[in-house]
Image (tube, rainbow, N blue to C red):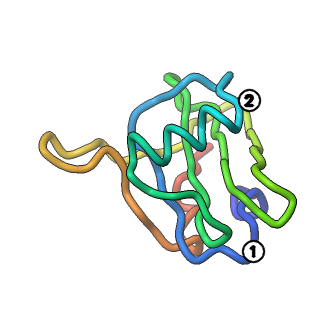
Amino acid sequence: MIKHLIPANLKRVVLYLQPISMRWGTAKLRSFCREKLGIEPDFSTAFLFVNKSHDCLLVYSTDSNGDRTLMKKLEKGAFIVPAPEPEGAPFIVMRPSIISRMFRS
């Protein structure tokens, strides 16, 4: 189910490990990716964000038509997000093929 939210042309997925507001628009997300994560959004990368209760996933990506966001809200269950390392980066980079492991019901 989750893999259907991720565009097929991607080479990497960046998962931000802390919750964010699901109200952020594309301009705020683009700025956040550049400034906070130090990663320039491009056609080959999608960014994943979760809310505080981990029942909402926000996918931010770019394509030839511009920036786009997709949101998935679970009726039950939660998205599994690894705990950040105390001195580590606030995000992890993964292959799109392992996205489905983030879901449990």
Horizontal arrangement in the rendering, residue 69 relative to residue 19 (left or right): right
Q: What is the CA distance from the residue labelled 1 to the residue labelled 2? A: 26 Å
In the rendered view of the protein, which quadrant contains the C terminus? Answer: top right
Q: Earlier in the sequence, mark 1 or mark 2?
A: 1
Query: Closer to the camera, 76 or 92?
Result: 92
Q: Residue furthest right?
A: 65
Which residue is found at the position 37% from the left and 50% from the top?
Answer: 91
Quick one: SS at disc 2?
Answer: loop
Q: Decide if residue 26 is on the left or right side of residue 90.
A: right
Within 10 angstroms of label 1, few (less than 14), some, or many (20 or more) residues?
Answer: few
Residue type at the position of mark 2? Glu
Residue at which label 2 appears? 75
Q: How many tags in the picture?
A: 2
Q: Which residue is mark 1?
A: 8
Q: Position of residue 80 (x, y in %)?
A: 47, 45
User: Splitting the image into 4 quarters, where does residue 94 fall?
Assistant: bottom left
Q: Is residue 65 left or right of residue 62?
A: right
Is the N terminus in the top left, top right, bottom left or bottom right quadrant? bottom right
Q: Which label sits on residue 56?
A: none
Whole-percent x, y for residue 65 in the image: 87, 59
Relative height, residue 65 to residue 18 (above, below)? below
- Residue 29: percent from the left, percent from the top? 60, 38
| Above or below for 10 versus 85 | below
Mark 1 against mark 2, which lies toward the viewer?
Answer: 1
Q: Residue at x 30, y 42 (%)?
A: 83
Q: Quadrant of residue 79?
A: top right
Instruction: Name the element at disc 1.
Output: loop
Could you tell me residue 103's position as x and y percent?
Answer: 58, 50
Left or right: 70 as drawn, with respect to 85: right
- At label 1, the amino acid type is Ala
